[in-house]
Structures are given as structure tokens and as C-alpha cells.
Image (spheres, rainbow, N blue to C red):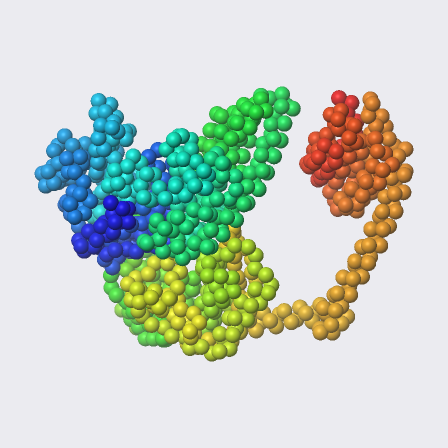
Amino acid sequence: MKASEIRSKWLQFFEGKGHKVEPSASLVPHNDPSLLWISAGMAPLKPYFDGRVKPDNPRLTNSQKCIRTTDIENVGKTRRHHTFFEMLGNFSFGDYFKVEAITWAWEFLTGKEWIGLDPERLSVTVYPEDEEAFKLWNEVVGIPAERIVKLQDNFWDIGEGPCGPCTEIFYDRGEAYGDLSDPECYPGGENERFLEVWNLVFSQFNHNKDGSYTPLPNKNIDTGAGLERFASLLQDVDSNFDTDLFQPIIQKSTSLAKVTYGEKEDVDVALKVIADHIRTVTFAVADGVLPSNEGRGYVIRRLLRRAVRYGKLIGLDKPFMYQLVETVGDIMGGYYPDVVTKREFIEKVISSEEERFHETLSDGLAILAEMSAEAKAAGKTWIGGADAFKLYDTYGFPLDLTEDFAAEHGLGVDREGFEAAMEEQRERARAARHESGSMKVQGGVLSDFTTKTEFIGYNELEVSSEIIALIADDQFVDVLTAGQSGQVILSKTPFYAESGGQVSDRGMLQGETGAAEVQGLFRAPHGQHVHQVTVTAGELRSGSSVKAEVNRELRGGVVKNHTATHLLHKALKETLGEHVNQAGSLVEADRLRFDFSHLGSISAEELATIEHRVNEQIWKALDVKIELKPIDEAKAMGAMALFGEKYGDIVRVVQVGSYSLELCGGCHVSNTAEIGLFKLVSESGIGSGVRRIEAVTGRGAYLFMDGQLELLKQSAALLKSNVSDVPKRIEALHSQLKDLARENESLQSKLSAIEAGELTDRVIEVGNTKLLSVQVQASSMDALRGLADELKVKLPDTVLVLGASVEDKVSFVVVVPQEEVKRGLHAGKLVKEVAAVCGGGGGGRPDMAQAGGKDISKLEEALKLPAKLIAK
């Protein structure tokens, strides 16, 4: 059975059991320490479990893409370790529980119309105290007691948050995979015979911060089954890598490398690592994650480089990973269309990163050579563990590559020191994961507050409303008095709660008994708008009426900037390419900020084009049409869905003329002419492959332009010219500066020649070596090198060590004649030691090198060192 068919059967089965199928979505960080990212569509599940959010449908099912790198060193060396995999799941939030979860699992696994596994080869494990699960498997399903194993580890608990006992289902692969006489050969043991295919978690407790456990308000089901494992069983192959999810990639790799799969273990490992990592990288890049030196981008960079290193082991010395993206699309594109539609962009990102790593690899080898030389010079027989780890962590060098290189130079590597440094990094990562992965139950009074409220702020900015709840210090109260801060919930409100990058509205609540300033809003677990207020006069009473009024000036600025972000998004795609996707935004009253994915810089001409295209849509006075539509209909219209956003069945479609079409829950102008003017303020890179544009509109654009004009007027005054003549005046000054620079350079050359003649008398002899080590006058490193060139002509057989004070720092140039190089002198090593005296460093070739230092006071001392070093 093909993997795609297994996935389809899963979704069909649970849809038939009343589950809503959650579609594939972008990858986002997950709070389970064992997972790096999961599908964004499933990211809200944990709040469903702990009661922070109430789902529209209490039953969900899906096939979610996951990335996990905790076992990266095992990938390719075992049958089932992967960095990217698909997790089939079914979930219940306070609806069904153990009976349904267990009986449905058995039906799906053994039913001939579904998976059709042999019931006699299935075993389960249960938590020892979970007698209910044991009886269900034994008495209802009919599994003999001897095939039900009680394991203390069968309790799903990742620290603070929802948890509970679990039951795991195993398939017996037969005697070829293990002998039952082995004490570890049992369901749940360390063996290859009993393959875990499904884990059913009965999430019914909350692990509290103090370590205690209390029952959750509702009992939940959280299950996971690996698609790759199902495929290996149903396709009757030895490992996941032999399934139709991996084999086409492996075969493409063998073709590129001209090797054969299945003959040599080291070749097979390389091919498996490449196949696994290209899947991970392809999906991550498709979801907007680009290689970088931090966060998710660092993980992708590491995986790419690891695959490239393994490629080199099988003869792939040039970029090749990008050529596998099409094959990944052929396998996965039916369910995940992004890996096909974004293929060209994904290939470009991967190819660029591969080329960069090949350059980095050369740099790393050079550093490794320097480490080896320093170790030998210090009389050591090994390279330090910290140095080896630095190469691994910074340049992607595996320890075995460092060990091979060191062995070629007669050295070993401090493996224990390397492992210690590696463990320190793991501890830091575990601590970070624990800190970020802790799930907190939002107990507060709002978790059970279900009274409905109405948001009318799309069309009205002022309304009479009733206060249905007042909250202070996380308690419902009857009154808030002057000077007191708290939260207010109204029966209906015109105030927008911060969402989708758009900031909250601000304004006033005015009642008969008092008034309050609305400073911001957030949404409660059941969707109500909660107003953060400070009472400015009198008091607010629960049940009383108030006039809720949004600050019109602030909202007016917000809507202009929000609609402008939609126009900007489209203009970026038109100018730079369809690969551009929003990576974040901020919409305030006085400015907008828009982050987006794009490789490379953006030219001034491109920025001008982007700005002009946005303004063109403003000048066309396009109507902004907003409608509610089923999400499938909206996507069929071509509406853009934003990265990481969660959408319901009915979505809000914002259409700007025929130019822009996006799903958006924010507030907008009714016609683009209301925006007035759009002006780019800045454009910059904020990370590898992510850029940021800041802009202003309307009144903000006018004030910005007025400020720029004032600066221009001030510049004209300083230049003693008219505003219109400023460019010509600056050009004339540049020309004058160039003439002066040439004149200065000519005079500097003459001075250098004179100084060179005077310095020839200061040559000393150290043994058989002639040495000139002196302080000279030089305005720059270029001038210092020029003087060295003059002296090389006059003193061709002399070692030159020249030092100068340049802009509050020290600069050195060392020149060693070829005859002295042959005798063992090395300019790079010499200048490094000299510069170290002044707190600096540098290096270079054996015959010529340069360096810098910080401490000018040590310059004289540094210039005495060469004679001592040569004397040795």
C-alpha cells in the first residue's frame, strides 16, 4: 500500500467517526521538548487540552508534518530515525475517551478495508495503574493478557501542563528481527522485532508548577501514529528508508553520485542522511524558514551542511541537494502542494546555501591547519576538545573529519573534551526547551466565562453598551473606582483587540457614574473582547450602561496603514517575485512595519518601483470590498493566506480592487484614496533571507516628507547653494576631495621615499639575519604597505618590521626576503606575535603579512620583540 493511500485511509476513517479533518498548514515551533516544529494547523491543540481555548469541533484528525532534530546523530544509522516525519493523529477535547480511542484504533489497524494488519501480531503496553485500559484491550478488544504489557514509562508527561497515562500499540515483525529469548525482546523493549505503530495518550491530568497533579476539567485524547512506520509494514520492507517515501530520492542520489544502494554500509548511511535531510529542508524552506545562524534558520543550515558533508563521502563535490527538490515534490506534492509550486524558490535557497558552505568548508580547513600548527608548536600531540567542538559547531565539521585531518599531521583529538563541550550545549538546549516548553493552564476567571459578546467595530466606532463583567486582580468584581485598573467586558464593543499585527484600539468608556480610558484589549478563551482600562473619574459598575467610543484619529491612521500593508505585499511579489511572503507585520496609527522573505538585497530602483506601485493603487481610488466566505471558496478565488495564521471554516476576504486579495480579520479603509500617500522610510535585512520595510502613510507620510525637505534646506544652507543645486554642489566637493586625496598620496609617496632613505641606516644584524624593526609615520595601512615596498627595493635582503600609530590604533607590516623564508622565518607567524604585545593579532603569507593592535603604549616594546625571536 502506498504511503499516500495510508494517509488518505486515515483521514477517511476518522472523518467517518465525526472528526473534522485539519488541513496541512505551515510548520511552527511546538512546546513538546521532543519536537522542534509541527504543523501550524495543530499548534492550538495544547490550549484546547488545558482549557485556554474552546474548539469549534471537539474531534479533529490530521496528518501533520513534524521536524525533530534531537536524534540527528542516529539518522541514517537506524531503520526509523528521521528529522522530518508525518504524524497521523486523532484528537478529542472533552468528547470521547478511552473506549472509543481504543476500539477505533483496533478497527482501523485490523479492518480489511483499512490497514488490515494481522490481529495475532499486535500487542499493547499500558500504564500499570490504568486498569480501565487493560480491561478494554483484554475484555472488549480481545487481546490475550500475555500480549498486554504493563510499563511504568507509559505516562505521557513533559513537565508543567496537561498529561496522562498512555497505551502503545506494537506490531510483531517476526523472528527475523529478534529472538524472544532476548530479555529486551518484548513490546516496549530495546529491540527491532516489536515496532511501535501508535500511541494513544489519555490526557486527563494537569502537571502543576509545584509538581502536584490535578484532574483537568475535561478528559482528552491525543494520539500519534507514524506514517513512515505504517508504510514500512504495509510495503514489507526492512526500514523506513526502503519505502516509497524515500526510495525515489535515494535512487536520484545514486544517479548523481554514480554509486549503488545496498552494497556498502557507509554509502547507504550517506544516501539515507541525504534523503532524510532534503525532505526536512525542502518543507522548511517552503514554509518560509531560511538558513541563518540562529533559531530555526540555524537548524536548517546545519541539516543542509550535514547532508553536503555526507555527499562528499560518496563523491558529490559540487552543489547537488537542490537537484533533489523536484523528487521530493513528486513524492509529497499531492498532499503538500507548496513543495511543488515553490520549487524554483526552494532550489535557489538550497543551491545558494550549498555554494556558501563549500566556501566555508575551505575556511574551516584553513583554521584546522592553523590549529594543528599551533598544537605542534606548543609541543602538544593533540587538538583540544574545545577547538574541535568550535569547528563542529561553527563550520559544521564532524569530529571524525577533524580526527582524520589531525591524524594526517601526526596528532590526536581530545575526544573527551569535545564530548564535554557537546554536552554543555545539549544542557543549554534542554534548559531552553524546558523554559519555552512549559505549558501553563490559564486557570483564571475567564476560562469558564462563556457569555457571548459582539464586536461591531468594523462599521461603528461608537456604541451604547452594557458592562457584563468587571475584573480586578483576576477576580470578578462589582465595581472599579477612580484610579483603579482592571478589565471590562461589554455586551457589544467597537474596540478592536490586537491581532494579525494590528494594534488594539484605544479610547474611552463613559457612563453615568464614571469614565475610564481604554488602553488596550485582548481576547478571552471563549473569544470575548476584554478591555484593559484605568478608571479616570467616578466608578464603573457591573450591569450599568456606558458609551464606548474608539479614538477616531488613531483608528484612522491604523486603517490607512493596514490597507497599505496589503498593497505593499502585492507590490513586493510583483517586483521581486512570487516567493515573497509575509513573515511578520506591525500596524500602528503612525507607521507600518512589514517583514518578508527574500534572498539578497533590494536595489534602489526596485524600492522605487515598489513604492510607485503602491501609490498607483492609491491614486486609482480602488474600492476595498470585504466579504465573509467559506475558506475553500476564498482560496479558490486566489486569496493569500498568511504564514502561521489559523483560519476557521468561514473567513474574512479583503479585496482591494482587482489588485490585492487576502484573508484578513483587520480593519481597513473603504477606498484606497483615503490612504493619501505611501512613503518608504527604510529597508533592511533582519536575518538570513528575511527583510524589513518600514513606511508611513497619510499624515505620517506628509510629516516625514516635510522633515526630509527641511533637512535638504539645511544642507543647502551649509553648502551655500540653492536646494536645486545641492547635487551639483556635492559633486563638485567630491571632485575637490579626490584631487586633494591624489595630491596627498603623491606627497605621502615622496615622504615615504625620504623616510625610507633615512631608515636604511638603522638596519641591525641578528646572527646572519639583517633586521629593520622600527616605528614609522603612516596615515593608513595602505601608506604603511607603500613604505614597506619602498624599503624592499632599497633593502632586498633585510627582514622588515614596520609599526605605526594609525587612528588611535597600531598597525604592523612584516616583510621577509625569500632567502630568510627558506631558512625558516615566516612573516605571518612573526607579525602575529609582535601584534599580540599590543593586544592585537593578524597573519599572512611567509614573505609578507600585516596585523593590528589596540595598545599604542606597547608599540616600542613590540618592535623590540623581532630581534629576540630571530635570535632564537
Q: Could you tell me which quadrant the N terminus lies in?
A: top left
Name the outermost residue toward the left.
139
Relative to residue 824, is residue 526 drawn left or right? left
State the image coordinates of residue 129 (x, y, percent, origin top left). 18, 35
Identity of the residue drawn at 40% across and 30% down? 264
Identity of the residue drawn at 49% across and 78% down? 620
Residue 251: quarter of image: top left
Residue 842: quarter of image: top right
From the viewer's side, name the closer residue of 338 and 717.
338
Identity of the residue drawn at 13% across and 36% down? 143
Tally of numbered discs:
0
Identity of the residue drawn at 36% across and 75% down? 459
Relative to residue 609, is residue 19 drawn left or right? left
Q: Is residue 221 above or below residue 665?
A: above
Residue 862 seen: yes
State the image coordinates of residue 243 (x, y, percent, origin top left). 31, 41
Q: Could you tell me which quadrant the C terminus lies in?
A: top right
Relative to residue 804, is residue 573 drawn left or right? left
From the viewer's side, name the closer residue of 692 and 555.
692
Residue 430 seen: no
Residue 384: quarter of image: top right
From the viewer's side, name the closer residue of 565 and 598.
598
Relative to residue 567, is residue 130 drawn left or right? left
State the image coordinates of residue 667 (x, y, percent, origin top left). 40, 70
State the image coordinates of residue 810 (x, y, percent, origin top left). 74, 40
